[in-house]
Image (cartoon, rainbow, N blue to C red):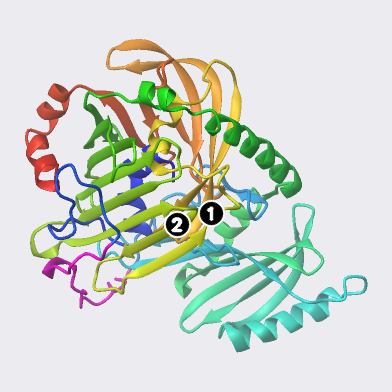
């Protein structure tokens, strides 16, 4: 996730994906002026495992349990497809070799799962020249019964657009299920799976048909070529970053931002940047404090500390998060160190889960690797005077995955800031290939004016006075998180 977007949006991702709740604990916070060290946090009572049972679905189901409308297009450049998923769903991302992505519909009054739609890739060894579709369908139906306990009641051959497909319908326990296997190449399939209560079978069946009508394949070769070009541009942008240029990119005064969601206040963010050494190494630090409060979700707090040396060879970071408060608060943390082309990251997911330690050799990514502090300063380090695309390699400890951040300069634009229209530079910032980009408006000098995430969260440059007016305890919250 891009650093601007991560700082405001990691809470929402955590709430949906469940990798760790945003949490704060006194243990493990660095002393003022110090730098985070990669060591485990001590447990606090707030991070003990929850014994609560999963919510139970309540019947009868609401009339809008299935809404036959589609949301904005989801693009998965890695897997080479795009389509429009249903509205009123939450997206989950599973980081497996199959690149599974899911959309779930939650019952608002109970929090229980009503139904789910998943999309993933699958391969089956077949005779590419003389495969009989009916024989293949029967073989796959047998495997689904054996491996997934999906009792296929019937299957049929069909098409999704111009692509051949096999539709399977049946039961998984008491639930109804449908899987559509779309042939992208002989032996390669894009699988759409939708499942939910039997009483919703016809509505879910029709909803999946509607989603499949929007399916489009992407030329992965073209995407890879564009990526190579953008990575080269990214490496070129990072190469000439000098100490003087970094020093000029630093804004010593504190920066404040207000967050809104669907037109209502949704939190705030404070950012402080400084040039300072770490263990005798000259470099730059960026610190950020964020509170996110979205209706029907617990308040989330996040503190981040990021350091990068002038030559980009040393990096340290610390993220600490909390969701909820009082006895129900949950917390976790992530610490990282890059030195001598080695990356070491420790993740405390919270909830009593085991500490995770990851280590990687960065030598093959060194030219493209973007340290987190530079990610925050990136708009001030690239040329905003002309349209251009840049790509960088970033590391996400929560997912334990390297991602491609794509940063594209679109061109001059205007944006409303309060009651005034301000001239700006429009850019798009995509944290990884499988997410929609954020739309960002920058000043000509690269300062963030406004960021719009695809799901409606907006971050806008503000004054400290305006933030304090909306959140009278803003300074106390920042102080409590640790200065």
Residue pointed to by mark 2:
343
Would residue 214 appear left or right of 96 to someone viewing this image? right
Q: Is residue 82 magenta?
A: no
In front of the other: 182 or 225: 225
Q: Residue at x 31, y 17 (%)?
A: 417
Residue lying at the far front of the rendered structure: 280
Query: Residue 6's x, y, as percent?
Result: 37, 44
Query: Residue 382's x, y, as percent?
Result: 51, 25
Residue pointed to by mark 1:
362
In front of the other: 70 or 481: 481
Q: Residue at x 42, y 36 (%)?
A: 374
Quadrant in which residue 335 is drawn:
bottom left
Residue 75 appearing in the image: yes
Q: Earlier in the sequence, mark 1 or mark 2?
A: 2
Residue 18 appearing in the image: no
Q: Are marks 1 and 2 in contact (CB under 8 Å)?
A: yes
- Say which element carries label 2: strand
- 270 in relation to 147, above or below: above
- 453 in relation to 85, above or below: above
Q: Residue at x 40, y 17 (%)?
A: 443
């Amino acid at each position: 996730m891009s650093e601007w977007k991560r700082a405001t949006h990691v809470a929402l991702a955590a709430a949906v994906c469940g990798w760790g709740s945003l949490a704060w604990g006194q243990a493990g916070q660095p002393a003022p002026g110090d730098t985070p060290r990669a060591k485990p946090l001590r447990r606090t009572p707030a991070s003990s495992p929850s014994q609560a049972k999963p919510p139970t679905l309540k019947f009868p189901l609401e009339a809008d349990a299935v809404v036959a409308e589609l949301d904005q297009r989801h693009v998965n450049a890695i897997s080479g497809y795009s389509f429009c998923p249903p509205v009123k769903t939450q997206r989950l991302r599973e980081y497996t070799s199959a690149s599974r992505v899911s959309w779930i519909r939650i019952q608002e009054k109970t929090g229980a799962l009503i139904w789910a739609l998943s999309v993933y890739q699958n391969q089956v060894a077949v005779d590419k020249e003389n495969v009989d579709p009916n024989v293949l369908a029967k073989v796959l139906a047998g495997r689904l019964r054996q491996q997934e306990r999906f009792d296929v009641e019937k299957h049929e051959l069909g098409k999704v657009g111009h692509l051949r497909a096999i539709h399977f319908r049946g039961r998984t326990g008491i639930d109804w299920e449908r899987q559509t296997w779309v042939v992208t190449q002989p032996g390669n399939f894009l699988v759409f799976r939708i499942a939910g209560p039997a009483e919703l079978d016809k509505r879910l069946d029709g909803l999946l048909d509607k989603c499949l009508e929007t399916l489009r394949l992407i030329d992965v070769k073209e995407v890879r070529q564009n990526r190579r070009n953008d990575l080269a541009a990214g490496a070129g942008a990072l190469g000439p970053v000098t100490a003087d240029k970094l020093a000029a990119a630093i804004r010593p005064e504190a920066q404040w931002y207000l967050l809104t969601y669907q037109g209502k206040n949704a939190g705030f963010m404070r950012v402080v940047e400084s040039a300072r050494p770490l263990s005798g190494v000259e470099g730059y630090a960026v610190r950020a404090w964020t509170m996110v409060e979205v209706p029907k979700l617990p308040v989330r707090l996040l503190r981040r500390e990021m350091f990068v040396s002038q030559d980009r060879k040393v990096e340290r970071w610390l993220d600490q998060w909390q969701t909820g408060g009082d006895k129900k608060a949950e917390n976790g943390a992530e610490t990282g160190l890059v030195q001598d082309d080695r990356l070491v990251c420790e993740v405390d997911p919270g909830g009593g889960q085991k500490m995770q330690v990851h280590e990687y050799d960065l030598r093959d990514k060194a030219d493209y690797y973007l340290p987190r502090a530079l990610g925050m300063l990136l708009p001030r380090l690239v040329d905003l005077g002309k349209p251009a695309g840049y790509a960088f390699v970033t590391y996400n400890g929560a997912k334990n995955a390297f991602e491609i951040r794509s940063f594209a300069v679109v061109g001059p634009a205007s944006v409303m800031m309060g009651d005034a229209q301000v001239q700006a530079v429009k850019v798009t910032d995509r944290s990884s290939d499988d997410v929609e980009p954020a739309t960002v408006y920058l000043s000509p000098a690269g300062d963030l004016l406004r960021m719009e995430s695809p799901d409606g969260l907006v971050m806008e440059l503000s004054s400290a006075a305006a933030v304090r007016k909306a959140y009278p305890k803003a300074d106390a919250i920042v102080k409590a998180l640790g200065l």
